[in-house]
Image (cartoon, helix red, strand yellow):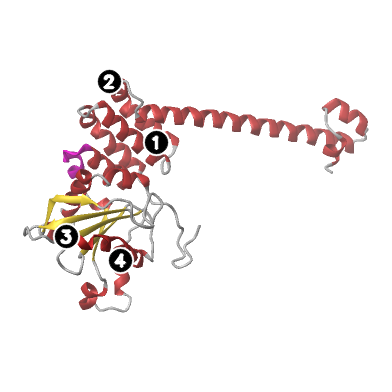
Amino acid sequence: MTNEKTGTAKRSHDPFFRWLFSDTTHARNLLELSAKVNLELNEFLSVVNLDTLVRIPDSYSEVDETGEADIAFRVNVATGAPVLVGILLEHKSGRDVGILEQIDRYVHSVMRLHEENRVFSGFPTMAIIFYNGRENWDPLKLLENGYPKYFHGSVLPFKCTFINMADIPDSDCLACEDTETGMGIVAMKYAFDKDKLLAVLPQFKSALQKMSGNKASCLLQKISLYLKEYVNQSILKELSMAFKSIGQKYGFVSAGDVFRQQIADARVEEQQKVKADAEAKALEDKLNTARGLLQDGVSIEILTRRFNLSEEAILGK
């Protein structure tokens, strides 16, 4: 489906991003890692108290697994005053020229549901766009269309910043004590770069082995399902080998097991295709031979019996 307003393809938001960063612990670690590469976000985190981070539930209108926005939180300011600030985590894996208008609608429809919890009439909100697409993109450059730089901070009715997940260093992800967040970021940032994916993702193996079986199992399965949309079977096979011992250690259905099943399914599909192609080629050869003999004067009755073909097939009717 295409968005008539923006001309972009409309698709459900990435469930992997929502699953992982709906958790306040993972969201906090994502924000702190991102703040290392984004000065504006770093300044924002310095004036709020992340210990008070609370997710706004998905009971508000138009926002669910296929809604317009990903995840919303509220947080107290660092001064201790009874004032709430909103945080939006908006994920994009492709360009969207309507992103700022989308966030504006979201701020007005979601953040105003909590007026009874705040002192001031406004609900200041920081919207953070997380991007992990193939191409370089900065949606905030849309503000340059007609507005001098002086006005950029005044154009939007909310604060907005942009994080290209490719800018978050691998070293920070690997060093993150929250393995789920670090590994999730790597899986997303290299979903379109198979060489980097194969080089970095297996480096989390020792960290995974320190996790409980259930948590590690869930994480590996979620990542395997996420990557299935982006990488081919050969990549899944290599990752399967990298994580194989983890599944053996815990005895659970790991990503490696999922990868192996995908590979087995792909192998059956490939064998079926090869068989169908061979049968089609054999039929084509029979038809060409029969038609050649027909031109040489062999009767159609003899040809239908000899090649087990219909007259219509031989005559091309």
Q: Nearer the viewer, mark 1 or mark 2?
A: 2
- Tell which of 261 and 85 is nearer to you: 85
Q: Nearer the viewer, mark 2 or mark 4?
A: 4
Q: Which residue is mark 1?
A: 235
The type of residue carrying mark 3 is: Leu
* Quadrant of the image occupied by residue 299: top right
Residue 103 image offset from top left, x and y in percent: 32, 63
Q: Which residues are magenta?
A: 171-179
* Quadrant of the image occupied by residue 261: top left
Q: Nearer the viewer, mark 3 or mark 1?
A: 3
Instruction: Estimate the spatial distance between the alpha carbons at disc 3 and disc 1, rounded to whole Å.
Output: 45 Å
Q: Which residue is mark 2?
A: 249
The type of residue carrying mark 4 is: His
Numbered tag placed on residue 157 in the rendering: none
Question: Residue at position x 30%, y 60% from top?
Answer: 110
Numbered tag placed on residue 108 in the rendering: 4
Q: Nearer the viewer, mark 2 or mark 3?
A: 3
Q: Which residue is mark 3?
A: 84
The type of residue carrying mark 2 is: Lys
Instruction: Estimate the spatial distance between the alpha carbons at disc 1 and disc 2, rounded to whole Å.
Output: 23 Å
